[in-house]
Amino acid sequence: MTDPILPESDHSLNWIARLVRAEPRLPLMGPYMLYLVLMFVIDFAPKDDVFRHVAIGFHIVGAGWATWLMRHYWPPLGTPRVVLALFVGLFAAWMWVAGQHWLESLWVSGVNLGGTLTFGGTFPFVTITPPDASAIVDVSAQFASPASFWTHVVLKITRAITIVPVVEELFWRGFLLRAFVRWDRFETVPLGRFTLFSFLGTSLLSVVQHPANWGVSILCWVLFNGLFYYTRSITCLMLTHAITNLALYVYVVRAGDWQFW
């Protein structure tokens, strides 16, 4: 990963170049980390309809701006492989819903496998809390008017199919799969280099991002990792991820299955 040639007068790009030289992981890690920070911040936004809309819009713009600034420092992103991405994305969305409902029907030694992972405590430092149907909220009833609800739907789906696939795939497939091979010089690891440790390690680590859907999260990351090893294309994974999110959210709105919102 090499720095582009930057005009001496372009101070805004030069300071980014200095940051990247100091921390080569920044272009692939930074947008995702900022996305998470902004998500944490907007969780504290007032639950007023307008504030909710503004918060999601700010989230999209803020994370998108940081991502755009880093675009010169990404590795080659590859081709989209549209047909393959479409089929895998739709399958992943189906698997996420069907798999979660199936896990919720399974009990092993008094533990519901569809429950939420909680980290900490005594060994093995992970517990599974049974799902609580009463905690699932009908999102459509939280807004003052249908127009406000549909504005929320459009904004959330827009975020899910634009900035989310980009920052997550840059991080998970572009960076972490390679960092699990060689952390100190990840940029020397070719895109799509397979090791069992990185393949399984990133799949298991995905549960930190999706503790309420830990089982299907592992399966989805196994699928996405496998697709990346096959295509060696971050663009294909971005498109696949966007199709998965779009199909999932369309299902949620149509079926009213709000646990996946």
Image (cartoon, grey):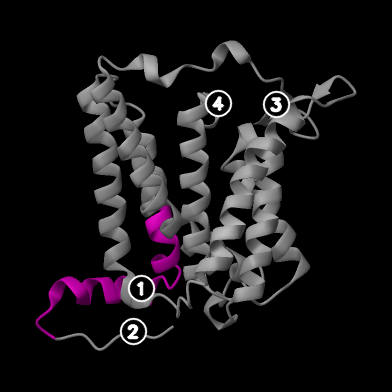
- In-image side of 24 versus 222 (left or right): left
Q: Main secondary structure of the magenta part?
A: helix
Q: CA distance from mark 4 to mark 3?
A: 12 Å
Is mark 3 in CB contact (under 8 Å) with mark 1? no
Residue 225: within the magenta? no
Q: Earlier in the sequence, mark 4 or mark 3?
A: 3
Q: State whether residue 46 appears in this view.
A: no
Report the residue that reaches farthest toward the top.
134
Type of amino acid at the residue the image marks with label 1: Val
User: Which residue bears the numbered disc 2?
Assistant: 3
Q: Verify CB contact (< 8 Å) between mark 2 and mark 1.
A: yes
Find residue 259 and name its label: 4
- Give me the C-alpha separation between circle 2 and circle 1: 8 Å
Q: Position of residue 147 (x, y in %)?
A: 24, 24
Q: Is residue 19 visible to the viewer in this orientation of the structure? A: yes
Q: Identify the disc placed on residue 45.
A: none
Q: Residues within 10 Å of mark 3 (few under 14, many from 20)?
A: many
The stretch of residues the image draws in magenta is: 8-33
Which residue is pictured at 56% across the width and 83% down the height?
Answer: 188
Q: Measure the alpha-carbon separation of dots 3 and 2.
A: 46 Å
- Against 110, residue 4 (above or below) is below
Would you identify the image quadrant in which residue 260 lies? top right
Secondary structure type for disc 3: loop
Residue position marked by numbered label 3 in the rendering: 115
Q: Which residue is mark 1?
A: 20
Closer mark to the observer between disc 2 and disc 1: 2
- Residue 43 x %, y %: 36, 29
257, above or below 228, in the image: above
Q: Position of residue 33 (x, y in %)?
A: 42, 52
